[in-house]
Image (spheres, helix red, strand yellow):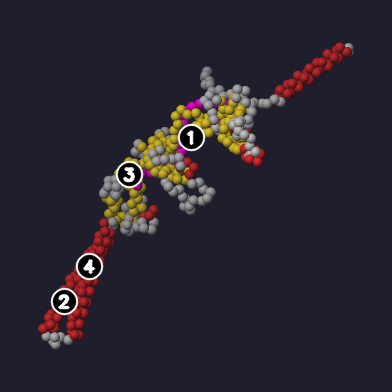
Amino acid sequence: MSKRAKLSIFGAIFLILVVTIGVMAATRGEKPIDVRVEAVETRDLVASVTASGRVQPRTMVDLSADITGRIVSLRVREGDMVKKGQLLLQIDPDQYEASVQRAEASLASVKAQATQTQANLQQARRDLQRAEEILKANPSSITPEQMEKFRTQAEIMEASAEASRHSVDQAIAGVRDARNNLTKTTIFAPMSGRVTRLNVEEGETAIMGTMNKDAATLLTISDMSVLETKVRVDETDVARVQIGDSTVVRIDAFPDTAFVGRVVQISNSSVRGASGAQADQAVDYEVTIQLVDAPPATRPDFSASAKIITDTRNKVLSIPIIALTVREHEAIMTDLDAPPVPVSAMQSEEQKKRDEEGVFVVGADNKVTFRPVKVGIAGEKFFEVLDGLKPGEKIVAGTYQAIRELKDGALVRQMQEPAAPTATKKT
């Protein structure tokens, strides 16, 4: 092989090595990260708080018996509409009628005794007055002991008359109490509404509700004309809720319909469990929402969820919620004419850097730069931008994994959106 041929072979080998090294170097270059890129633009935003609860009538009355007795007449059924003053049920009145008769007889007896005592008092007073007249006419005719006896007898009769008057008052009160108990054997509707719960049947025994109200409740009447939803709102959200806020309520029983409501009450104390609030438990507050135009088929205790509109913004600059992230950022000195600061007064490098909220802005070279932004209200998918961005700027808007790992200067590439599926034509 000639020398010239060897040089040609060596030259070819060298060229191949150079090309291979160049390809390897290019391969080892920075690989772009696939991200979703969106332009910053204006949108209408609605901030809201979502909570769940149950539908309840604004006015609901549990009726229980104030006396014990057997129910002899039940005039309503569950679901019936009743009017104020309508008879609902009657408890056996026999023993209470007998009590009234005994009380009236006792009253008549003590009145007779009082009359007799009053007559004795009048007699004692006349005897005393006659003795005083005789003593005045003839001082020696009546001894001091006899006069003392007349005075004592009159005082005793006065005390007896006073006691009789009190006995009459007590007997009158007994009659009043017996008659009152008799009236409690008939239970009337305290308001107009619907019987939403009926816990007894005719023939059962009604018990007094002093010790156990739940067990003693006979029935419940609800005014279904005004319905409310009581929802529990987390402590982190309740401060944003105000009286009068409009709401959108969805009732599970009517899944295809949304109802309008407004906030009418916010509790001042938290909702506590049976054992009280624990340190590691979430704290909720009850918010009452009055429904507008709820359907007639709505019943108490229907499950519902409410979206409370706490704020709105029209045509404001916004970014996707997923785009906002937190990075350690170093503040940039903008006052170049400021005098130098002594080393002793300068902050350490760790003190200069702090975590800030911001987004990654995509430059013309497809490299990203972290930029702090100030955000306002949060809608369902977007944050309001108060400062830090301009309309039209492109930012990284996904994916969450990509944003979490991005760093300043990283090269990115717009992800290809998946093509919409096309319908296949049947043959």
- Frontmost of labels 2 and 1 is 1
Q: Earlier in the sequence, mark 1 or mark 3?
A: 3
* Image mark for residue 168: 4
Residue wearing tag 2: 125
- Amino acid on which disc 4 is placed: Val
- Frontmost of labels 1 and 3 is 1
* Image mark for residue 223: 3
Cα separation between marks 4 and 1: 75 Å
The picture places residue 368, in percent across and down from the top left corner, at 61, 27
- Amino acid on which disc 1 is placed: Ile
In front: 318, or 137?
137
In front: 315, or 152?
315
Tell me what residue is drawn at x 44 percent, y 33 percent.
312
- Frontmost of labels 3 and 4 is 4
Cα separation between marks 4 and 2: 22 Å
- Mark 3, secondary structure of its residue: strand
| Residue most extreme to the bottom | 140
The picture places residue 51, in percent across and down from the top left corner, at 45, 40
Q: Which residues are magenta?
A: 37-60
In front: 412, or 350?
350
Residue wearing tag 1: 377
Q: Is residue 156 above or below residue 418?
A: below
Report crowding for label 3: few under 14, some 14 to 19, many 20 or more residues within 10 A (C-alpha). some
Q: Earlier in the sequence, mark 3 or mark 4?
A: 4
Q: Earlier in the sequence, mark 2 or mark 1?
A: 2
